Amino acid sequence: MTTLFMDGFGRHWWLLVLYGVVGVLVGVYAVAYPLDAAVALAWAIGVMALAEGVMGLAALLANGVPAGRGWVLLYALVSLLFGLLAVINPMATAGALLLVMACWFVIAGVFRLLFALSIRRHVRGEWVIALSGLLGILLGTFFLAEPLAGLVVATVWFGAGALIYGVLQIAAGLRLKRLHANGS
């Protein structure tokens, strides 16, 4: 371990633990209350979109835009509109995002099936790609047919990921703390 690493990151091991605790709490909440968590997540995304829109407009007014002014204006207005919709009606936003994801699953599944068929003469095990495509189509179709159940499933998956992330962050932070204590 280099001294620079231990001095720079070792002292701040608690940040990893803090991120981990937040991750675990979010994960537990998402698994225990998936619909509430989906609404809260959609609302939070809306708040972030509002912030992006305000920052875009501020950059336009300050003449500090690296891209074309028209594109920045469009982005800022779309961000503000989406943000307002998400904050005002987060459940509808969560449902709409799920439907977009469901369509993506179906399209990606079809692409994987076609890809597997096109490479079957050149690659062994193409059936795995085809199977992933079939599963994507089935999952997307399920989400489209049962959006509320799909929202619950997607949020529980998100919660499980947040739990795993949180536990890993806590473990990394505690390990960093031990390394810092041994290196000091």
Image (cartoon, grey):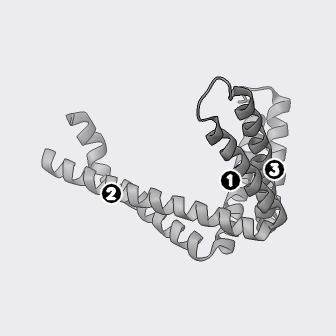
Mark earlier in primary sequence (2, 1): 1
Q: In which quarter of the image is residue 62?
A: top right
The residues tagged by marks 2 and 1 sit, at their Cα atoms, a distance apart of 29 Å
Mark 1 is on which residue type? Met
Q: How crowded is mark 1: few (under 14 residues within 10 Å), some or many (20 or more)?
A: some
In the foreground, 95 or 83 = 95
Mark 3 is on which residue type? Cys
On screen, residue 148 above or below 175: below
Mark 1, secondary structure of its residue: helix
Q: Which mark is residue 48?
A: 1
In the foreground, 95 or 16 = 95
State the residue at coordinates (32%, 51%).
12
Q: Residue 111 carries which label?
A: none
Q: Mark 3 points at which residue?
A: 103
Mark 2 is on which residue type? Ala
- Residue 94 position, x and y percent, is 76, 62
Mark 2, secondary structure of its residue: helix
Mark nearest the camera among 2 and 3 is 3
Q: Name the residue under label 2.
A: 171
Mark 3, secondary structure of its residue: helix
Q: State yes or no: discs 3 and 1 in contact (Cβ < 8 Å).
A: no
Mark nearest the camera among 2 and 1 is 2
- Residue 122 position, x and y percent, is 64, 23
